[in-house]
Amino acid sequence: MNANVIIIGGGPAGLFTAIQSSKKNKKVIILEKNSTPGKKLLITGSGQCNLTQAGNIKQFFNHYGENDKFIRSSLYGFNNKDLINFFKKRGVDFSTTDQGKIFPASYQAKDILNVLLQACSEKNIIIKYSEPVQQIKFSQDSKNFISKTNKNEYVSEYLVLATGGQSYTVTGSSGDGYQFAKSLGHTINQPKPSLTPLYIENYQFSDLAGISLSEVGISLWRKGSLLKRWSGDLLFTHKGLSGPGILNYSRYIDAGDTIKLKLIDAKNEAILDNDLANKIELNGKLLFKNLLKELPLPYRLTSKIIETASIENDKISAQVTKAERKKVAKLLFALPLTVERLGGFNVAMVTKGGISLKEIDPKTMESSILANFFAVGEVLDLDGDTGGYNLQAAFSTGYMAGQAIKARI
Ligand SMILES: Cc1cc2nc3c(=O)[nH]c(=O)nc-3n(C[C@H](O)[C@H](O)[C@H](O)COP(=O)(O)OP(=O)(O)OC[C@H]3O[C@@H](n4cnc5c(N)ncnc54)[C@H](O)[C@@H]3O)c2cc1C
C-alpha cells in the first residue's frame, strides 16, 4: 500500500503529527500496534490528563534535564497556549491547579483523545489498528520507506517514528522505535526508567508510607561526592521514596547513590543541635519524643528519627545525652538513604534516553542522517518533569514535524 506519509504509533505525538501534516489529496496513514489508540494518553494524570503547565513558555526550559536546549525551538513553535487553544477551539474547557498544572475541566483524558481522533477523521487520516510495525527499510533506489507490519507492507515518501519510550509497555510503548531508528543508522542513548520512585537499602521507614513532606532539601551523593542539590515535595512509600521531588530528579540518580534529606531547614547541623539543646534545657521534664513534636514534622517521623538514633522511646529529654542529641540533629539535618535501585520500566512514567538528539534537527524533527525520516515524542532522548511537560513535548515536537512535512508534500 502506498502513502505520502506513514506515522508509526498512534499516541499523542503520532496523532498530532498526522493532523499537522495532512494536506488535501495526500495520504497520511498511522500504523498502531494496539487495537485502540492513545492507551498511554488515557492513563495520564491518573486518567485526568495533566496536558501542560500555565505560564510563560520560557519557564518550561529547565524542566527537561540535560536536553532542554533541544526542545526550545519546538516549544516556541507550538507553546502551551497554542496547545490549549487547539483543544479549546474544539470544545474542551480547562482547569488550572494552584501549582499551574492544566487539566481538561472534565478531568477526563478521553476528552483530549476524542478531539485528536475527531480531527484525524475530519482530515481523512487513516489509522490502521492492530498492525505492529515489525521492520522498516529505506530504498536507496526509489528513495521510499518501506514499513512492514504483521499484515501489510507500506511504501511512503515520508516516515515518522512516534513509537514512544519503553515504560508502561502494556500501553504499547515497548522500545520498538529504538531498533527501527538504529536500523536506519541512528545512535540510541541507553534507555533508562525516569520519573520513577526509589527503592532504599535496609529501608527503616515502611511504616511511614503515605507521609508526604513539602519542599524538603534533597542532596544526591555518589561515592562520597556531592552531585546535586534541590528541594521538592517528597513521599515516603512502603519501600522507599517518591513524590515530585524524587520523580523529577530520578533521571540523575543511580543504584548505589546516597540521597540525603534535610528534614529541618537549618543553616547547619551545629545550629540545629544548639536549638535542640535549648529546647531540652527549657523542657527537660518532657518525654524527648514529645519535645520533638515542636518541630514542623509529622510525629510519626520524629518518633522514627528517635528510634533510628537508638534512643529509648520513653526517655525524658533531660536524660538524653549530648551524643544522642547530636545524632538526632545529624539525622534531621541530613538523613542518609542509600538507593538500592530505581523503579523499573513497569512503574516509570517516562524513559530517559532514546534517539540521540544530535542527529535530529530541533526545528523540524527530521533526521540529519536520512532525509524525510522524522522522530517525535518520547522515542527521542527527551524526558520532562511531571506536571504536563511530557505531553507538551509530544505535541510540540509533533507539530514541528507535521508542519515541516506539510510544507514539502
Ligand atoms: C502512568 C503515566 C502517567 C502519565 N501522566 C502524564 C501527565 O499527566 N502529563 C504528561 O505530560 N505526561 C504524562 N505521562 C507521560 C506521557 O504519557 C508520555 O510522555 C506521552 O504519552 C508520550 O507520547 P508519545 O506519543 O511519544 O508515546 P506513547 O504515548 O507511548 O505512544 C506511542 C504509540 O506507539 C505505538 N507503538 C509502539 N511500537 C509500535 C510498533 N512497533 N508498531 C505500531 N505502533 C507502535 C504504541 O502502541 C503507542 O500507541 C504519563 C505517563 C505514564 C506512564
Image (spheres, grey):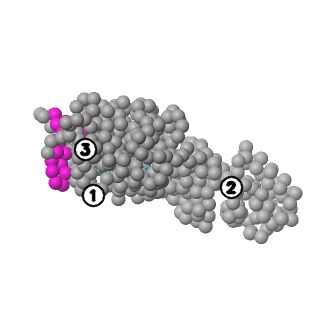
Q: Is residue 156 visible?
A: yes
Per the image, the residue denoted by label 2 is 331
Nearest to N terminus: mark 2 or mark 3:
3
Amino acid of disc 2: Leu
Q: Position of residue 305 (x, y in %)?
A: 69, 61
Per the image, the residue denoted by label 1 is 35
Nearest to N terminus: mark 1 or mark 3:
1
Q: Position of residue 295 (x, y in %)?
A: 75, 56
Is the residue 54 above or below the residue 47 in the image?
above
Q: Position of residue 38 (x, y in %)?
A: 35, 52
For image coordinates 54% across by 46% down, the residue present is 96
Q: Is residue 196 magenta?
A: no
For image coordinates 80% across by 57% down, the residue present is 322
Give the magenta range.
Answer: 143-159
Along the line of sight, the residue nearer the viewer: 82 or 62: 82
Tag in front: 2 or 3 = 3
Number of other residues with Cα within 10 Å of mark 1, as a class: few under 14, some 14 to 19, many 20 or more: few
> Horizontal placement of 142 versus 219: left or right?
left
Per the image, the residue denoted by label 3 is 125
Amino acid of disc 3: Ile
Q: Is residue 148 magenta?
A: yes
Q: Main secondary structure of the magenta part?
A: strand
Local secondary structure at mark 2:
helix
> Horizontal placement of 14 versus 283: left or right?
left
Is the residue 92 above or below the residue 287 in the image?
above
Number of other residues with Cα within 10 Å of mark 2, as a class: few under 14, some 14 to 19, many 20 or more: many
